[in-house]
Image (cartoon, rainbow, N blue to C red):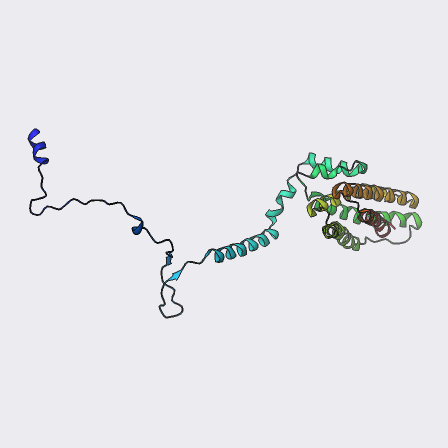
Amino acid sequence: MATDDSLSNLPTSHLLGSVPAVVTEEKGPSSQEAPGANLQIFPPNNGGNNWRGYQTLGGPGEGDGQQATNQSANNWKGFFSISSYTQYFNVDTDIVLNRILSSLYPISGDFFSKIDANPDLYGLIWISTTLIFVIASLGNCATYLMHRSNDSTISWTFDVSYVNVATCAIYGYALLVPLGFYFLLQYMGANASLIRFWCLWGYSLFIFILSSFLLIIPFEFLRWTVILASGAASAVFVALNLKSYIQNDLTLVLVAAFVLQIGLAIFIKMWFFP
């Protein structure tokens, strides 16, 4: 073993056929890539049928513009996607009942504080839909009772147009009125949230579902008392909560919200429970 070690240590650079050792040198600054070098895309940009060299990568401005365009397209896709609205239906029975009870106790004025962390569209969709079928069906029932009490010999038929009128009136009111107040407050520089406004006006309609069952009683004075009391309670609920939310002295806006709720109540009485 010692002999082998001594032989391996003999110099061999003078022997024929020997290869000199490769010495690794550190790369200096001159061997590094120039700072201004451009990356190239392969294959080259033909520019038609002719070869005209390589196409350089686009600058940051081109990429940002393309990214902004894609983001805008994704936003519009999200607007028309049902999955974008699932967060506004993330409520359970206890939350919905609590908000319904708040709408029946209008003088509290703390509805926005309850929905601030999780505004929902349940009231806008399901309460409005329930109210449509309730006033359409009970309205026909009320007209039947009125005909029976006046003259039982007159034939009576179910008025299907009640459903069409109720659908246009209730959905139109629940969607367009909050939308109008949203744009109005935005124009005036006040704080506004369309989702919260839809939630507020949606739950404000619940009291009309309850009052509709009393409107089938064929006594006109009782009907007007019930519908005006329901409309006043709903109007106070909307006006007081709207006042606590916008935190500005916009009396005209609050009066308009109050009058519109009273107008809806009178419309329900005059059209569906004449």
Residue situated in front as seen by the camera: 199 or 14: 14
In the image, residue 101 sits, relative to residue 224, either above or below, namely above
Determine the residue positioned at 69% across, 34% down. Answer: 94
Q: What percent of the width, then of the height, locates residue 161? A: 79, 55
Left or right of 248 in this view: 29: left
Q: Is residue 216 visible?
A: no
Residue situated in front as seen by the camera: 12 or 193: 12
Determine the residue positioned at 84% across, 44% down. Answer: 231
Farthest front residue?
29
Q: Is residue 71 visible?
A: yes
Left or right of 274 in this view: 71: left
Q: What percent of the width, then of the height, locates residue 148? A: 90, 48
Q: What percent of the width, then of the height, locates residue 111? A: 74, 38
Farthest top residue?
2
Farthest bottom residue?
49
Q: What percent of the width, then of the height, locates residue 232? A: 85, 43
Determine the residue positioned at 82% across, 44% down. Answer: 235
Q: What is the count of numbered marks?
A: 0
Left or right of 162 in this view: 119: left
Residue situated in front as seen by the camera: 119 or 96: 119
Q: Tell me the quadrant of the picture where the N terminus can be found.
A: top left
In the image, residue 78 sits, relative to residue 49, either above or below, namely above
Left or right of 28 in this view: 13: left
Residue situated in front as seen by the camera: 210 or 248: 248
